Image: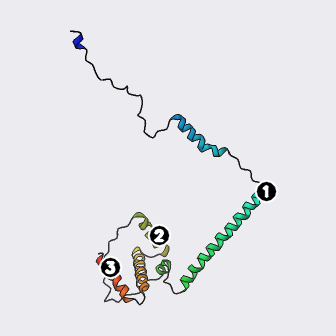
Amino acid sequence: MAADKNISLPVTEKRGRGRPRKLDAMTNAQRQAAFRARHKTDKKRVTVTKNEYDELVLECERLREELAMARRAIAKPRGRMASEGEPPAASAVLAKPVPPADEAESDNKRLVVTMNGREIFSLQRLEAHYGISKRAVLERLIWWVDRSVVQSFGEDDMAFNRYLSRVTKNR
């Protein structure tokens, strides 16, 4: 009867201790080799002679001059664009009131606008800077954008009509 009580059980692998390892985990030796490779360049010292230093300084001055020339070249067209009858910048528009509309066309409607924090802070900054209400800031900016869009079409009525039909289709 004692022989009948022996039941053979499948042998499982002994469970390892601690947390199971990730598949891409490095061994300690691999980690140490990677650390040494990263820090190998820190120990290399570079000695620059006086002649090499002077060459580096001259090269830096030449590059600074090239950068300054490029900045001046970019700044010149910007100045010309503003003086050649381009629409005024937003800052110039905010300083002036919106041109008066005909009373027959002017029907005040309420518009609800949802803004993120960034836009709210920008609106508050503009309000404080120009000393006008938030409503006036929004009215002037909307008027300026609308005028800029209409002026961008110039005398091309077909393009303007295509723009209007595209805008109304997207509603």
Residue 146 in the image, given as x and y percentages of width and height? 40, 81
**Amino acid type, callout 3:** Arg
Image quadrant containing the C terminus: bottom left
Residue 125 badge: 2
Q: What element does badge 1 sit on?
A: helix
Q: What element does badge 3 sit on?
A: helix
CA gap, disc 3 and disc 1: 67 Å
CA gap, disc 3 and disc 2: 34 Å
Residue 121 in the image, given as x and y percentages of width and height? 44, 66
Q: What element does badge 2 sit on?
A: helix
Q: Is residue 80 left or right of residue 138?
A: right
**Amino acid type, callout 1:** Lys
Q: Is residue 98 visible?
A: no
Q: Neighbour class for label 1 at 10 Å: few (<14), some, many (≥20)?
A: few
Residue drawn at (38%, 27%) of the image: 15
**Amino acid type, callout 2:** Arg
Residue drawn at (23%, 13%) of the image: 5
Q: Neighbour class for label 3 at 10 Å: few (<14), some, many (≥20)?
A: few
Q: Which residue is mark 3?
A: 166
Q: Which residue is mark 1?
A: 50
Dots 3, 1 in contact, CB < 8 A: no
Residue drawn at (41%, 85%) of the image: 153
Q: Neighbour class for label 2 at 10 Å: few (<14), some, many (≥20)?
A: few
Q: From the viewer's perspective, is residue 19 above or below residue 109?
A: above
